[in-house]
Amino acid sequence: MSESVVLPVDQAARAYATDPRHHVVLEASAGTGKTRVLVDRYLALLAAGVDPRHVLAITFTRKAAAEMRERIVTDLQARYPEVWQGLRDRADEIAVSTIDAFCFALLREFPLEAGLDPGFTLADETEVARLVEMSLDRTLRECRDRAPFDEGIRLVLAQLTLPRLFEGLRALLERRFVAPAALRQYLRTQVRQVRSEAASAERARQDLRLRLGAIPGGITAWIASGPGDVPLWTLCRLDLDRLLADPVAVPMTAAEVRAALDGLARWLLTREGDARKKPAAVKAAFASVGDWNRHREALPHVADAVIAARRGFEASLNVLLARGIRRVFRLAYRRYLETLLLHDALDFSEVLQRAVQLLANMDEFSRSRFRLEARYQHVLVDEFQDTSRLQWQLVASLVEAWGAGLGLGHEGPLPPSLFLVGDRKQSIYRFRDADVGLLDEAVGFVRTLADDAPVRQAISQSFRSHADLLAFANDLAAGMVLPGAPPAIAFRYGPDDRFPLPAGHVPGAEAEPRLALVLGDDVEACASGVAAEIVRLLAEGLVTDRGGDAPRRVRPGDIAILFRSRESHREFERALSARGVPGYVYKGLGFYDADEIKDLVALVRVLAAPESHLRVAAFLRSGFVGLSDDGLRRLAPDLAGWLGSDGPDAAGPGDRPAAAGRVVDGLSPDDAEALARLRAAWPGWRALVDRLPPAEVIDHVLEQSAYAVTLRGPRQAQARENVKKFRGLVRRIQNRGYATMARIAGHIDRVSAGDESNAAVDAADAVNLMTVHASKGLEFPIVFLVNLTRGTGGVPPPLRVLAGDSGEAPIVGVARYEPGATEAEQVRDREESKRLMYVAVTRARERLYLSAAAGRQGKVVAGPGSLAAVCPEGVLAAMTAALASGVDEVSWQGQVHAHRLRVCRQPAGAVEPLEGEGQAAAAVVCISDEVPASLAPLPAHPPARHVRVTSLAAGRLDTTSIAGGHPAVDEELVLGRAVHRLLARAIVGESTAVLAQRVLADLEPDERLAVRDVAALADDVAALVQGVWGDHALRDALASPAARFEVPIVFRHEHAGEVCLVRGTVDCLVRTAAGVRVLEFKTGQPQPSHRRQLALYVDAVRAMLPGAQVEGQLVYAARRPAASSPRAARLPFD
């Protein structure tokens, strides 16, 4: 951890910012405790007597709002108990809101003033997608009807296909409060007067004639000097003759002019669009050397003239297209508003717009304005760098009366105050219209309220990262500051942004550097190297918790793998899975890219259209069927015929098509069995499609196909939650109206290209895989920043509308026109990539790894739009040197410090699981997920009796079936269950209070009913577990990554001549250097049956792991006296 002094070096700025008498715009660098400053300011307001109803605190996520309110209440109780006593009965008035929730509440309070029905509803994301689709479908139909009479719309339809236009309009609707103003301003600032497409074409011909007439030697002589029989030149000469001819004698349409200019470009320009330096034909093709020289010398001048004429023509067409897009968008927006009105709903963007309009028109409603100004006297805004211009307009409208001395706010215990906190270096949500330049604008606005008092404050002392990582972040960020971007969007890193380091600190002085590189020939090699390093860290790495002194072993949840785009996590997920390391794919990654969702989508699509061979092929390869590639090839081409049903009524054998009765030669037994099962079930599934709602059909197929069996593996929890989320999505769609399977399939096809995130699951003990965007606001002891050289890529959007920065004119590009829009977008992307890089490296507390794949020549080459493209050149040079030399360590000299970077080498040989080497260790990894072959599920023969291991150990075989009932729940049983659960889930070293909270959270309803005092029980359980931890060797074993808790086990056992199937659960299996330890925890008095139960488990594990040394240990949990350890009886069976 970074070294710190008692008072931060920026303490004066912190004290000023927390003083509620000041208006403040606070710039807080990463990890500097900005939330603490905001909470302290909120508490200072309450301590000064401000009513919490008069404080408006805004942040940008519900999670952040809940956490901030919890901190405010907790700190208020601890630091200002007398204030809390006065507010506890109305603690609900202490509120932190998201901006969406605030706007929604505002419209709910003043619906009539906002022009809304009081009963309006808020549409969720699923409903919004459907409403947008309905609106745009209607818009495109009307556009086709209007095109013959509207040249602008006709030109748009000629340049963009309907799917591309649909995509562009949907993007404009999402940005409908930014894009229309930019379009309007763009068209207003165009000097070129463009009347029509034909006029633009004629102007381009005139421009070309004027420019070519001025070239040295004349255009006629240049044409005469051309080569003879060269097809490309012949076509070029013909295009030139037509373009230069009299327009009355040789008229040309706009399409012909565009095609002719493109034809000239093939002779005059390179593939990159630059002027050629010599002709495209060889010298021998010309009549003489003199002709070749004359043609070559004038070639650049002719090319420049064509480039200029072509750009002018395309710019004119772009203006016409922009006019057409503006008309189409106006129509789309009207239709969307009509659709929202028809459904009596608003989306989040419309809620924000209506709230802004409401505040702007409050002069017409004096009573409502009086209520608002009396209420909001102190406004605090968190994460201001993520604010859009419309959101800032909302905040400014709330406080604008203060500057004029109006309203009731001046009558409170403190004058009104505005507090904005953010960090422009972390503004990474431009795709949501976040405006990084607003922070500077806000300073100017707040100064009008502050009576010349200082407004801008900055804090930069980090409480998060080790000093070595802070020094690296300083040099990296400073090296990314380059000229060329508009000041409003440029990445800046000045003295106030630099993290202060402890006096005399020298980066890299420790034996092992805290910075490291993981390099490879491709992404798969990098992923393998990252996974191998994670295995090493879990085995021998140490980290220190924030606020802690003693280091502890690294756990999977301490590690994060970050990348820029969500398409790049699969290789790393597979590499972790191959080594038995649990991983969790965080939000922002591909929900529709998950294997289980692909399977469900394939099911829905084939049920909607079973006659489609392509859809049948996808379904046959899905987890529902599992047909091999070879089997699929043998069934082709009549794949649909093999399903054995043409429709829902073809349920009998006589109705099946001919293909269903054929036998496939060469089909493997597994494929034949899978196909037979499917053909038996398929008619029934299809028969349900038109008789049940889609969600019920999907549930029926999931149950009948036993699909849950395919979800086993390291991703089991995530996969199950994803399946539940998909079922929920289908139900929400069908609950809003008539939904057939075909409509569900069509909706999924449209939304599957979006950024839907995976279902949320508990990832407390798994490596976190997430995008840099998703990691913002989080921190991890160890961070791997991977795929540095991979660019963003993708097809450019059909419509590019960029608002102007710092008073500059906006830029609009439609289709392939207006290259300036693409160039301006690239500049913005480059500056945002710098901010993304800053966010990524500041997530790490103790260790930071950079990973990149080498190019074809063994060098680390940054792809366009990649994070590596914005790194200082020295960082990439250090990576290339590490690849070429094979050294174990390289260095990079930043602007201030030299930094050591360890080079992680992937170990040679086969991939081994996390626990260790050898077959026995691999079996231990799989024991909690897949049953080994020696303990595979056994066929249920009638004579075989199913018994519990506890019954067998007690000498009782009369408990017949496992399903025959469960023991009665009493307090002793609850105590034992709770101890077992806590040992499996608790983190070694947690306090008694935390352990007791875990116990209470995990108690089942029937367990609570069986206990007289649950609080006392929780304390007892915590004390017993801490007693177990008193044995240091046992504590280390339980904290080891090799420990597996609650391992289900089934084995055969012969008793008195009768073979029984024995079922039980091993409390804990631990892989050690000597073999495997079986730990059995007990909370009661020692009994002989305990030793017999342990012996049964040890025998079963020895059978499962032949050759491994297995030992068992009984651990009796008891409250530990001052210096004693829990009683443990060791049974050395070997």
Image (cartoon, rainbow, N blue to C red):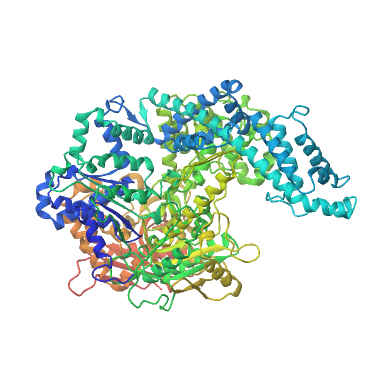
| Residue 18, percent from left and from top | 22, 56
Q: Quadrant of the C terminus?
A: bottom left
Taking 655 as reference, is 915 above or below it? below
| Left or right of 883 in this view: 1041 | left
Query: Going 79% across and 45% down the picture, which residue do you hit?
Result: 218
Q: Of 1015 and 164, which appears nearest the observer?
A: 164
Quadrant location of residue 993? bottom left
| Left or right of 1032 in this view: 784 | right
Quadrant location of residue 17? bottom left
Q: Is residue 409 visible?
A: yes
| Residue 186, percent from left and from top | 50, 37
Taking 621 as reference, is 643 above or below it? above
Q: Of 123 and 428, which appears nearest the observer?
A: 428
| Residue 952, percent from left and from top | 34, 57
Taking 4 as reference, is 1064 above or below it? above
| Residue 361, percent from left and from top | 29, 30
Q: How many marks?
A: 0
Taking 744 as reference, is 549 above or below it? below
